[in-house]
Each structure stands twice: as C-alpha cells, then as structure tokens.
Amino acid sequence: MDFELSREQKLIQKMIREFTENEIAPITAETDRTSTYPAETIDKLFDCGVMGMAVPKEYGGAGADLLSAAICVEEISKQCASTGDIVATHNGLCCAPILENGTEEQKKKYLPMLTQGHKVGAFALTESNAGSDASKGTTTARLEGDKYILNGSKIFITNGYVAEVFVVFAMTDPSKGTKGISAFIVEKDFPGFSVGKHEEKLGLHGSPTAEIVFTDCEVPKENLLGQEGKGFRIAMATLDGGRIGIAAQALGIAEGAMQEAINFTKTREQFGRPIAKFQNTQFELANMHVGIEAGRLLCYKAAAIKNTGARVTLDAATAKLFCSELAMKVTTKAVQMHGGYGYTKDYPVERMMRDAKITEIYEGTSEIQRVVISGNIL
Ligand SMILES: Cc1cc2nc3c(=O)[nH]c(=O)nc-3n(C[C@H](O)[C@H](O)[C@H](O)COP(=O)(O)OP(=O)(O)OC[C@H]3O[C@@H](n4cnc5c(N)ncnc54)[C@H](O)[C@@H]3O)c2cc1C
C-alpha cells in the first residue's frame, strides 16, 4: 500500500490546482449568480487534457489514470462545484462507457470528438417516473431497417443543453424488464432529438441541467453501445465509476469550505480575540480535517481499484456516501462559523452549502448508496 501520489499524479494535481486558482476561482461567484455555463473554462480544460483525462492517447485523451481524473475533479470542485460536475459527467459518464463498451469504430469516432473535438458529453438515464429505480424507464428504441427509432424523454440531464454526444438508455424489449434495456450513442443533431426544460436549481448554477426529448429520433444501428439488452448492466457499471467522480467533487467542496472557515475564523474577532482562538471553533475545524482525510482515502482507494479494472461497486458507493454527507456537514458548519456573514453572498460558503446538497442526491441518493452497500456486505 502506497500513500504517495506518483510523480505524474503530483504534476497533474499541481497543474490543475494552478489552473483552478487562476482561471476558475475568479469567476465562480459570477457563474453562480448568473447561472452561466462556463464555456470558456471548459474549452481551456479541453486544451489542457482534463476533458478526457483517462481516455488513452490513441483516442485523443490525456492517457492518465483514474486517480488523476478524480484529483482533477477534487481540485476544481474546491473552487467551483459546477465546473467539477461538468467535468465529472463528461469523463465518468460519457467517455468512460464508450471506452469500456464501445466497438473500435465507435471509440475511433466518438472519443476524439469528446477530447480533441471539444464536444461535451452527457449520460441520460433518469426519467420522470424512473429515478432511484432506473429500471422503470419508458423510453423505447425500435429497430427499423438500419436505424433505431427512439421515443420518450429523460430529465435532469447534466450538460443537457450544451452536450453534443449522449449515452442514452432505452427499452428495446419492454417485456424483458432490465434485460430489455439497451444503450445508445446519440448525437444532438440526429433527427428527432431536442432539448426540453432547462432546470433552475438550488445550487450548481453553472452546471447545465435539462430535459432531453426523443420524437421518432433516428439513431443509426451501429450506434448501439454494447449488445442489445445489456444497457442496464452498462448503466450500473458506469455509475460505479461515476460515483467516484461525485465523491471527488464532494471532497473538493468540503476542502474548499474548510479553507474558507479557517480563513474567516482567523480574522474575525469577537470577545477581543479571533474566533479561531475559541476551543469550540478549533474542535470543529479538527473534525472537518479528520472527515476530509478519511474521505480522501476512501475516494482515492476507489479510484485506484477502478483503475485496476476490478469491480468497484462497494468501494465507490462507500466513498460517494461518505464524501457527500461529509460535504454537507462541513459546508453547513462552515456557514455556522461565519455567523450572519455566512448567510450572505459576500462569502462563498453559502454557495458551497447549496452545491454540496446535490452530491447526496445524484448518481444514486444516499439511501440508494446504503442499499448498494448493505446488499454487498450482507
Ligand atoms: C442537478 C441534477 C443533475 C442530474 N444529472 C443526471 C444525469 O446527468 N443523468 C441522469 O440520468 N440523471 C441525472 N440526475 C438524476 C438523479 O440521478 C436522480 O434525481 C436521483 O437518482 C434520484 O432520483 P429521483 O429524483 O427520481 O428521486 P426518487 O427516486 O423519487 O427518490 C425520492 C426519495 O425516495 C428515496 N428512495 C427511493 N427509493 C428508495 C429505497 N429503495 N430505499 C430508501 N429510500 C428510497 C430517495 O433516496 C429519495 O430520498 C440528476 C439530478 C439532478 C437534480
């Protein structure tokens, strides 16, 4: 067991930390206030290889390992959880399933688009009546000649109104339940594809969330991802990997909030001294540190296991559950430590608290992580 990052991982961490401090931190508050998709930042992240970080170089990616990809999301999310979400979704939920399940032709066509081509990716599983129980989706895909015809809609899709490539799940044989679900690679320009409602959210204001709609949407037969009927397995395996990204995002949010709490309590004086001099403040900061160290170990361990190709369902759910609840606890406490200032937009902790909440909900709620964990240990 080695607790040191490799030389390459340290270099990537340094690069992304500097990028985040110089390019992302200055615009985060404005991104949140105006609910603006940070298009320029994402373009720059494509240029420095973060979008497609773990895609092999032969397909246009940076060819780094999955721990490096998690470190990127962690570092970005310290300053901007929205940007962290856009990156985590692109890498973990769109590039990864294509890399892991695609034919050579699909990988050669789509991965360079999602890396060098600056096209953002998305993952479309959730429907209005199929959230935690994703097996109950009613979007259908009917084979007609050399095309599948998709009908239905997906909601809450991250990158929904900016993405150009979607990994979509639809029923090819509704009589077979989960074994009747198949996965497809869908481009936004395919006939019959459209974007519906743009969501207004509690947090993650810079992350574009939208409904996507298929109205007799024509998807070439060769865009079936994996075999017919294997879509549900692909979705669940993808979410195993994706949850490591959310753990990293939550970890980054918690780290960012702890730093803000340290900065504030060292300078804010009450009763004639900085509030960091009160033992209660010190103990709360110590608790934050302990949680963050534990969360980082769980997150990095899950990424390292996934990198070996081994099954990571239990470790990913454990890391995601722990880190997302940690992010909520740390950000809430950081707001408390700021007193009234923490409740205003003059300090970033209120945004961090709003952003943290989603990590307990998407890619499986905390309750669903507990279902997965208990199912694996019983
Ligand atoms: C901002 C945002 C971005 C998202 N991005 C994407 C995306 O890119 N792609 C995508 O496909 N989806 C995405 N989602 C959807 C997200 O994954 C779902 O919202 C989530 O899985 C929960 O599903 P639901 O909202 O239908 O809640 P429900 O499943 O209706 O759950 C409601 C409550 O019931 C609880 N519950 C449900 N089942 C159980 C159970 N068995 N035991 C105990 N409690 C249970 C839940 O934990 C929750 O507290 C996103 C959602 C949001 C809000």
Image: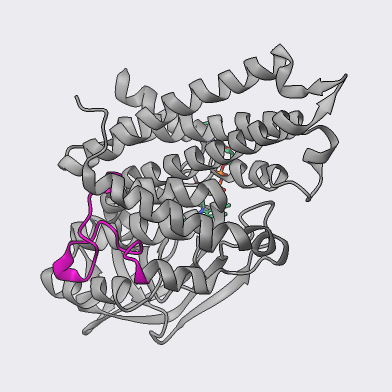
Please identify the quarter of the rendering in which residue 18 is found: bottom left
Q: How many marks?
A: 0
Q: Is residue 372 above or below residue 278?
A: below
Residue 306 appears at what percent x and percent y? 23, 41
Q: Is residue 161 above or below residue 237?
A: below
Residue 122 lies in the magenta stretch: no
Q: Is residue 79 above or below residue 357?
A: below
Give the side of residue 292 with respect to residue 284, left or right: left
Residue 66 lies in the magenta stretch: yes
Which image quarter is the C terminus in? Answer: top left
Residue 102 appears at what percent x and percent y? 18, 65
Q: Over which residues does the magenta segment extend? A: 47-67
| Residue at 22%, 84% in the rendered image | 145
| Residue at 37%, 26% in the rendered image | 373
Indicate how the structure is coloured in the image. one colour
Residue 144 appears at what percent x and percent y? 26, 81
| Residue at 52%, 60% in the rendered image | 22
Please identify the quarter of the rendering in which residue 375 is found: top left
Which image quarter is the N terminus in? Answer: top left
| Residue at 29%, 50% in the rendered image | 11
Q: Nearer the viewer, residue 280 or 84?
A: 280
Q: Nearer the viewer, residue 38 or 283?
A: 283
Q: Main secondary structure of the magenta part?
A: loop
Asked whether the viewer can see residue 127, the reply is: no
Asked whether the viewer can see residue 246, the reply is: yes
